[in-house]
């Protein structure tokens, strides 16, 4: 059974940092492209970062230079280091089994950034 479980969200102040984790199981992780997406209330799903099995990386302009995606293939985990968080980063964050926003995803983790 394929599972993706996000964790690490929380409430922080503007300028602070968080690291999100996504633990996966049920499929071969090391060669699977993975992504992070986020969705704020009333907004569309935004693809903010992706990483392929061989290390190709994508960042949306809105997070480039502040967020870092990484993966630990041995432990089947995906990470998103988020620095200098801003109120506009507030959303539910999901990891996605895909290169892009559309694919199987977990239940999400809420990130709230106060000004």
Image (spheres, rainbow, N blue to C red):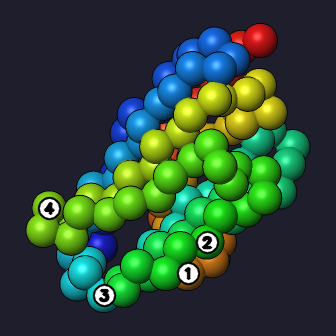
What's the residue at 65%, 64% (across, down)?
59
How many residues crowd mark 3 within 10 Å: few (<14), some (14–19), many (20+)?
few
| SS for dot 1 | loop
Residue at 55% over, 60% down: 36
N-terminal of the pair, mark 3 or mark 2, is 3
Of the residues under marks 3 and 4, which one precedes in the sequence?
3
Residue 58's label in the rendered image is: 2
Give the x, y percent position of residue 62.
78, 51
- Residue 10 position (above or below residue 23): above
Quarter of the image for residue 23 reads bottom left
Residue shown at the point (47%, 58%) measured from the top left: 69
Residue indicated by mark 4:
75
Write down the residue under mark 1: 99
Give the Cα separation between the discs numbered 2 and 1: 9 Å
Q: Are marks 2 and 1 in contact (CB under 8 Å)?
A: yes
Q: CA distance from mark 2 to mark 4?
A: 22 Å
């Amino acid at each position: 059974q394929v599972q993706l479980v996000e964790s690490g969200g929380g409430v922080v102040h503007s300028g602070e940092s968080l690291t999100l984790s996504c633990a996966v199981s049920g499929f071969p992780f090391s060669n699977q492209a993975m992504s992070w997406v986020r969705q704020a209330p009333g907004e569309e799903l935004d693809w903010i970062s992706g990483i392929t099995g061989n290390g190709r990386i994508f960042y949306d302009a809105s997070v480039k230079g502040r967020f870092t995606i990484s993966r630990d293939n041995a432990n089947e985990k995906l990470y998103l280091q988020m620095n200098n968080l801003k109120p506009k980063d507030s959303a539910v964050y999901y990891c996605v089994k895909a290169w892009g926003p559309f694919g199987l995803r977990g239940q999400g983790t809420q990130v709230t950034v106060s000004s």
